[in-house]
Amino acid sequence: MKKIYLSLSTKMFLFTMIPFVLVIIIISILSIQHRIEYERALTSNRIEAYVTLLESGDLSFNSIKQKKKLEKLFNEKVLSAELIKRDRSIAFTTGGSEYEINKERIDKAFQGYIITFTKQNKIPVLISLRPIIVKNTVVGILHLELSFEKSNDRIKQHTLFVLFLDVFSIILSFLLTYFLSKKIILNRIKSLTDMCSEIRRGNLNYRLSVKSHDELGKLALTFNDTVGKLAERNQQLKEEKQKVLDNIRELERYREHLEELVKERTGKLEKSRTELDVLNKQLQAANKELEAFAYSVSHDLRAPLRNIDGFSQILLEDYSDILDKQGQHYLQRVRAGTQNMGQLIDDILSLSRSGRHHMDKKTINIEPIVREVCKSLENELKDRKVDFVVHECPPALADSHFVKIVFTNLLSNALKFTRIRENAKIEIGSMTEDGHTIFFTKDNGTGFDMKYADKLFVPFQRLHRAEEYEGSGIGLAIVQRIIHRHGGRIWAKSEIDVGTTFYFTL
Amino acid sequence: MRPEDIRILLIEDNPDDVELTLRAFKKHNLSNHITVARDGEEALDIIFQRGKESAGELKHDLILLDLKLPKVDGMEVLRQIKENPETKVIPVIILTSSKEENDLAESYRLGANSYIRKPVNFEKFTKVVMQLGLYWLLINEPPPQKQ
């Protein structure tokens, strides 16, 4: 079955109009019926009043004949009026009766009042058979035939009036309903719909005008409020968006600034690099100069020494007969001095070389190097007995050539200062502290006073007298320089007559 | 060849060193034929007999060369000697005060036969020179000379 969709206005209209019209129709019918009843009752009352007058004797039965008087009395046209006696004969009559009153009806009328409405030539007619009672005796029956035309006209008029009222009220209610549904409800609903469309289009400033405080008014208020909130929210969102955009713009500015900064820094860096290049070149030049200096020291300073020595020797060889012992001794001292100076020059050069030469760092095993150094030093020992103890050492990242120089210097020092011991003991080993490997060389030699510890690594600084222990005081300076070049650290602990321990990292 | 017949070219600018060296040679009775060149240029003139009509046969059996020389330095002299097929057969002993590794390496690269660092102790020096000279001249057989 096809479902019929009715618009809201139609529904409202139908729901209002159908009961209304039904009620109007029912009321109208009742009203017309009531009018008919009223008209009949009015006429029968008049008949009753007339009969009462007849029965009391205030009016003569003869008045029945006076048709015009009766018509005036009943306010209807009298078609016929007659008095029928007990013997069924007619005592008085106006004549002109249209209906044949049968005997049976008359008999019945003697028992009680009979009133009938009928129609004759489309005109309603009242037929009344009223017994007339005088002194408790029915003396006769008043037979009346009244045309009900006047009453009927009034009923018709009334009906017309009612119909007119019906039509009027229906039209009025129709208009009212229409106005209500259309103007009061539907238009406002439509305005809500319009608002929705506006909002959908993005116009959040649209508001409904609220004229009443009914449900729709409340709805409109709620709607306005909701839209207001929405607008507020939208505004917040817009503001937040603006903030985000501002942030982005600021970031953009920062980025530009950063770029500028980077450019500037790069420029500065470039400049620094150029400056560094210049410095580097200067440094290289200085290095070259230093090398040239070292070269000339090596070459030029040694030459005169050689000559001093050479000519001293010639003097000793060729002129010994004219030089006494003392003179020869002095010449020997001159020669020793020159050789000492030659050694000093060599030491300075090796110190300078330890700082200058290229380093080749690799992971190397320390132990074999230590053993090699020990062996070569042992070969130089004559009648001395030295106990070399080499502990296990981990590999290290270092230049093997330089490491060898370090151990050679440290161990030859250790040998030198354990000369006084019958049982010299030299230990080489390593330990770990804070994840760093520390190597050490420990001897039981003569030791030194720790208050001079800071002078230990100063070139040509000696902690012992030259007569006691030979040496130029350059060995530990070389060792320190090598350790520093490896990024390491060297220090010593010593106690006089107990021994010295050197610690270093690589 | 007897030691006293050896012809030696000593290239050395320091007169003291020259005197001491000559004395050492004389003392060991090594040679009566020592030519001395005082700088690199003079040495080259002598070796290649420049300024003379024609190049004769080689006049020296051994060259002692100091590296640090005025005008033309020792390295250059060595280079020229060893580049020339005529002269490159002459043993050249480098005599120097320097102990620079660069000099040592460069000398051997250019074809020096020995490299001696002059010690301060003159006695040692003389001994070393004698030993080397004798080695190169007497023990080592020189290449056959062109007739």
Image (cartoon, rainbow, N blue to C red):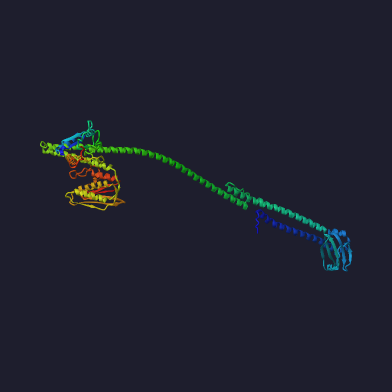
Residue B8: % across, % down: 18, 36
Q: Is residue B103 left or right of residue B28?
A: right
> Does the rendering let one see residue A474?
yes
The front one of A316 and A163 is A316
Q: Is residue A214 left or right of residue A48?
A: left
Tell me the quarter of the image containing the N terminus of chain A.
Answer: bottom right
Which of the 4 image quadrants contains residue A267? Answer: top left
Residue A197: % across, % down: 60, 49
The front one of A42 and B95 is B95
Residue A429: % across, % down: 26, 51
Taking the spot 42% from the left edge, 40% from the top edge, the residue there is A263
Q: Is residue A281 left or right of residue A319?
A: right
Taking the spot 45% from the left edge, 42% from the top edge, the residue there is A255
> Does the rendering let one see residue A212?
no
Q: Residue furthest left?
A: A321
The front one of A224 and A437 is A437
- Number of residue marks: 0
The answer to whether residue A376 is above or below residue B2 is below
Q: Is residue A264 left or right of residue A136?
A: left
Residue A315: % across, % down: 14, 36
Q: Residue furthest front?
A: B147
The front one of A17 and B132 is B132
The answer to whether residue A116 is above or below residue A488 is below
